[in-house]
Amino acid sequence: MLVHLQKVTRAGKAVTGGIVMNTAMMGELVQLTPPLGCSFNFYEKPENFRGSPTDYTVEETRAYIRSYMNLIATDEVVILDAFPHNDNTLETVRYAAHYDEIVKVYPAEPAINTSDRDRSWVVLNHSGTKIERILVDQYYLDFVSINRTGTSSTTTSSTSTSSTSSTSTSSTSTTSTTSTSSTTTIP
């Protein structure tokens, strides 16, 4: 599942800015003491865990990231508006990518971006055979909005009190209700 994170460090160096990452490519999540969130190793080629991962520290907590790990994408294919040869002077073409091949998505650098910051780099892992970086004319946070499902349990309680009175008689009743529901999450 894709999750948006705010970077604090990457490979031991201080960095800032947002990034969308595939939770399936994260190693063990280590909760840090506040105000820092958590740290983890990120594998661009998870099929080869012997490779060199990149360590990240992010502002978000371990629980926040794990909540995204429990979701499942409902779309198997994502349509990208890609610039041929990563050349932003050319017209975009439609490019179909499998959702689970998306490694990470981050904003393109200012020199090739627009004032709306709507161009992004998408890194794809093609079944471990090739890592590809594609320049797209799409905002990086839009990738977090791809349809997904999951269940979340919520408990609600309500109390109702009614009272009736007459000249000499009075009665009071109280009702309490608790319900649990399961929902589908689609941002």
Image (tube, rainbow, N blue to C red):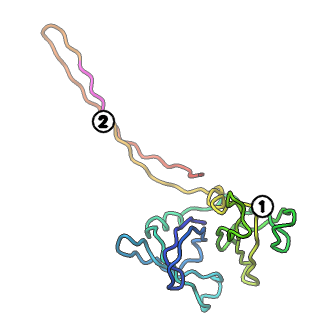
Question: Which residue is disc 1 drawn over?
Answer: 79
Q: Residue 78's quadrant in the figure?
A: bottom right
Which residue occupies 39% across, 47% down? 155
Question: Which residue is disc 2 drawn over?
Answer: 176
Which residue occupies 12% across, 9% down? 168
Which residue occupies 40% across, 75% down? 31
Q: Residue 162 magenta-drawn?
A: yes
Q: CA distance from mark 1 to mark 2?
A: 49 Å
Give the magenta-colored segment's residue range.
159-163
Q: Is residue 173 left or right of residue 52?
A: left
Dot label at residue 37 = none
Give the x, y percent position of residue 151: 52, 55
Earlier in the chain: of badge 1 and badge 2, it is 1
Which residue occupies 70% across, 70% down? 121
Q: Is residue 147 left or right of residue 62?
A: right
Give the x, y percent position of residue 108: 69, 69
Disc 1 vs disc 2: Cβ atoms closer than 8 Å?
A: no
User: Looking at the picture, which amino acid does disc 1 mark?
Assistant: Ile
